[in-house]
Structures are given as structure tokens and as C-alpha cells.
Image: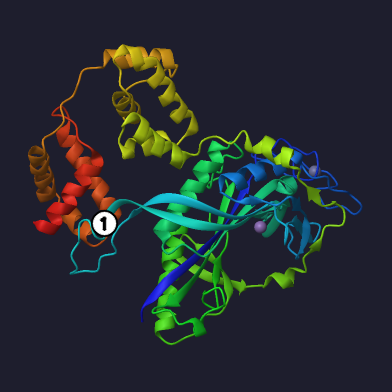
Amino acid sequence: MNLEPVIGLEVHVELNTLSKMFCGCPADYFGKSPNTQTCPVCLGLPGALPVPNKKAIEMTILLGTALGCKINRTSRFDRKNYFYPDLPKGYQISQYDEPVAVNGRLKFGFQNFPTLRSGSRLHVGTKFKVEEEKTVRIRRVHLEEDTGKLIHSEVNGKSVTLVDFNRSGVPLVEIVTEADIQSSQEAKAFLKEIQKIIRYLRISEADMEKGIMRLEPSISLRQLPIDNSQLTKEGLPNYRVEIKNINSFRFAQRAIDYEIDRQKELLSAGKKIPQETRGWSESKGVTFYQRSKEEAHAYRYFPEPDIPPLFFSEEFINGIVSVLPELPRPRSERFVKEYGIRVSEALILTEDRGEAELFEELVRLGKDKNLFPQRIANLLVNKKVGKSDRRPSLLVEEMIKLNVPETEMSEETLSGICREVMALNQEVVGQLMSGKEKALDFLIGQVFRRLKGQGRADPDLVGKKILEIITNG
Ligand code: ZN
Ligand code: MN
């Protein structure tokens, strides 16, 4: 059975506003004693009235714009009704049919490693590319409030569940993609790009480990060739399995891979897969059944009666959009074109907005001092300078001192070194051939250890050389 993964993502990100979404309590709950950052509004006490946080709305408009969305001129909050102990009101204030932003797209690059089965051969240049480009459509970006936090603990020898409402009401932005993603690698690359953009916009730390950014992938499999009578009118399978609350890139990748395999097995055995919500157990490395998935109507969405609809004027939107910085991906493309640096270096330098700005400042300062962008990029990427002080004027001085040209390796010498390294690491080469992408990084690292003092080379080129040797012998 030929099956292709169809993956959509929901990403929740807490915004770094000073106060919460609908009250004046501090939004920074990290490390605070439980239930000390609360008031009648975020505790959901009867009669308390919510007032939307303007800053959070501005941040959502900024993010929506960065993701190429249309900003709705009218937007509204709705009540999403469900019962859970971390939600004292019995409903979450969210957005339903008039979200802040809709219909965007995000372009990103990703490492596309061939999925190799034993006995198959690796084809350089056909299946393997250092970086492939992918565009994922963004369905919507909306604003809502976070819930409280349940803490499972033990008191006087009894297992109890405690609840901390410090997080209740923290502004939460939700990004929903169309089901355009086809593998766990793509999902991971998409998430990294989203995280980078959010950090560029300085609207959140977007840290997954702290739970500031959380992920829910929805996964189903579509049979090939495509048979429309078996699909929904959007061309999607008629079920989807959602995996809840994943809090690291690695878990995301593992959970998606596990779920693809699980579904493949069931479908290949002629079984139907129910629409359901599953959890991810990192210790067991499996997804597990949590509940059958609700449809939107189960939440009985209705307009939040205590908050009037929002109307955004053109001036208001333009004012926000005017502070949109150049985003990481276009910036890396410009660095390559404008400064002639390597793609791999441009990608590293634009990981962080501060680092990218520092690089350009150094290029400006080095201009009349025979210090070229290529050299600056190289020294920054390899962290050869600025270990204690990162002031641009001092960094330039340090760089000039180090400015002795290195020789570029000849192809032949490089090939020779690659072969030596591969001969010494045959087991790792075997792992690479079975599709383990880390193996290539390891081999590149080994080649670089040998290069030390002999000259320099481009890591992408080294990777290509290794793959070439595997294919052509
Ligand atoms: Zn409050
Ligand atoms: Mn949500």
C-alpha cells in the first residue's frame, strides 16, 4: 500500500507582554509561588469582566503579517466551552470565525535526507540536497488565553492534583497551518523557522522546554494514487489523529514518526483509524489513546458577550507593520547576494537577530580596514573572536589581528581526507547509508578535525564529497 503522510500543525505560543490577556496581573509566571499572580478575572470568579490587552493584539497582528497573512479589519473573541480543572470559567476566551489573521504562508529550508532501505543506494544530486525549500500555508493566527497548570504531586502520602492559576489568562497566540507538511523533518524545520521569526519579532522567547511554545501535530495518511472519492472535499483523509502538548523539537519528530508507522500498519492491515486525540510518552516512545476527538461544534463557540468586537483602522495596522524587521530567511538570502558569504554561514548568522545585526555592523566597520565580509562571517560563525567582549569596535580590532589568509583546500586533497575518514569509520558510513542523518554530521566533523591547520573547506562541500564517494565508490 502506497501511503503519504498528511500533517498539519497547531502551535501555541505565550506572548511576552507585561500583563495578562484580560486583566492586569503580571504575565511572567515563571518560578513564582503558586496562585500569587491572580485576580478575580483570571480566577474566573463570577461577575469579573475581561479587558483585552492591546499590546497582545498588536503582537498578533505583527506575527500575522510576518507570516504573510491578511489581517482582518474586524476581529472578535469567542467563548470555547469545555470543562477541565485548569479552566476555572468553564470556557476559554479564544477566537472562532473572525481571528486576527488568516491565509498566510511560510517559506523555509530543510535538510532532506533520503529515506534509505537496506540494500538501496544513495543517489547524490537526485534524492539528496543540502537544503530544500518548502512553503506551508498558514490557515489562521488567533489570540486566546492560557489555562492554569495542573501539578500532580503527593501530599501526606496521598497522590493529589494541585492547580496553579498563575498561568491562567496569559496571552496565547495560536498558529494553525494547512495540512501541507509531509514528514517529521519538514515539521521540525517549520517549527524552527516559526520560532526564529517569533524571536526576531521579540514577541516571545518561544522556548519549547519551558512550555512557552507548545505543539499539536495532526497526522493522517493518504493513499496513493489519490482517489478523491475516499477523501474530504479539501482532498484530505476523512480522519485525523491529533497529538497533544509536545514540548521539544525532538519529541515532535519522534512522535510524528511513531504515529506515521502506527497508522501505516493499521491501514495496511485493512483497518480504519478513528478520529482521536493521543498523547506522547517520551519514556515509552509511543503515542497513546487519550480521547475521541471533538469536532468544533462540541465546544459550542459563541461570541464573548463581555468584549465588543475589535475594529482595526488602516493607520493602526500600518503603524504596527512599520516596525516589522527583515525576517531571517530573506535576510540570509540577502547576506549571500550582498556580501558573497556562504549559504551555510548566512543561515547561522541569521539564526539570531542580534547576531545578524552585529555582522552587518562589523562589515560596515571593517570596510576601510581590509576586513572582508567573508572573513568576518567565518570568524563569527566559528566563534574565533569575542569570547569576553562583543562590542563591535573591539571585535573589529580582534579580527584584524587574526586577519592572516588561510588557503582553500584543493578538491583532490579534500577527497583524499574524506576517503581516509570514511575508511576509519566504516560503521558510521553504514549508518549514513541506512538514512541516519547524524552520521553525516559526524563524518564532516571528523574531516574538519583532520583539516585543522592544513587549510579550510566548506562543510556543505565536504558533505557532498562524502555522499559522492558512497555512490561512486
Ligand atoms: Zn488576573
Ligand atoms: Mn488553542
Q: Residue at x 60, y 51 (%)?
A: 69
Q: Residue at x 26, y 47 (%)?
A: 441
Is 53 rendered above or below residue 95?
above
Amino acid type, label 1: Phe
Q: Nearer the viewer, residue 443 or 224?
A: 224
Q: Residue at x 47, y 57 (%)?
A: 252
Whether residue 461 sits left or right of residue 320 in the image: it is left
Kindly state the secondary structure of the residue where label 1 is placed: loop
Is 316 rendered above or below residue 215?
above
User: From where the camera sits, is residue 248 visible?
Assistant: no
Which residue is at the far bottom? 270
Q: Position of residue 254 (x, y in %)?
A: 42, 60
Is 136 rendered above or below residue 17?
below
Residue 369's image quarter?
A: top left
Identify the colour scheme used.
Answer: rainbow
Whether residue 144 sits left or right of residue 64 in the image: it is right
Residue hosting label 1? 128
Check the picture and name the quadrant holding the C terminus.
bottom left
Check the picture and name the quadrant holding the N terminus.
bottom left
- How many tags in the picture? 1
Q: Position of residue 112 (x, y in %)?
A: 33, 56
